[in-house]
Image (cartoon, rainbow, N blue to C red):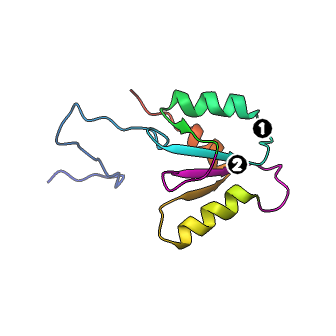
Amino acid sequence: MNENIDNIEVIQFSNPAQQLVHPFSNKQIVFTGALSTMTRVEAAKKVRAYGGVLQGAVTKETDFVILGDKRRGVSSKQLKAEQLISLGVDIQIMLEEDFLWVLSMKIEK
């Protein structure tokens, strides 16, 4: 009997060539409000480095709307995202803190 003492779950892929991808890979991303930790240009470079695509406006194709910590109230981009979400469109609204956490994920290429 081969027992795992630490109860650590091991996930094995059926195809060893299969790779994990970053959550922003091939995703459409919109920023609204100023970021407190970096400029939008810096944030855009980081998103592109993980395969994300920046959009200037929220559309049905948007995957993530990032809310900067320095925003003033609810922006028109946030309102548009919320409207689309209410219609069943799959858009994730993400606070800057959560955006930074996702950026910190290191996925091997």
| Crowding near the residue tagged with mark 1, few <14, some 14–19, many ≥20 C-alpha atoms within 10 Å | some
User: Which residue is denoted by mark 1 in the rendering?
Assistant: 37
Horizontal side, residue 65 vs residue 10: left or right: right
Horizontal side, residue 35 vs residue 22: left or right: right
The residue shown at (28%, 47%) is 11
Q: Earlier in the sequence, mark 1 or mark 2?
A: 1
Q: Which mark is residue 53?
A: none
Seen from the viewer's position, the closer of residues 31 and 83 is: 83
Q: How many marks?
A: 2
Residue 34: x, y in percent? 79, 44
Residue 26: x, y in percent? 43, 39
Determine whether label 1 and label 2 are within 8 Å by CB: yes
**Is residue 69 part of the magenta span, yes or no?**
yes
Residue range (magenta): 57-74
The residue shown at (55%, 53%) is 59
Residue 2: x, y in percent? 18, 50
The residue shown at (62%, 52%) is 65
SS label for mark 2: helix
Quadrant holding the C terminus: top left
Seen from the viewer's position, the closer of residues 18 and 64 is: 64
**Label 1 amino acid?**
Thr
For residue 80, what is the image quadrant?
Answer: bottom right
**Is residue 99 part of the magenta span, yes or no?**
no
User: Which residue is denoted by mark 2 in the rendering?
Assistant: 96
Quadrant holding the N terminus: bottom left
**Label 1 vs label 2: CA separation?**
9 Å
Horizontal side, residue 39 vs residue 49: left or right: right
SS label for mark 1: loop
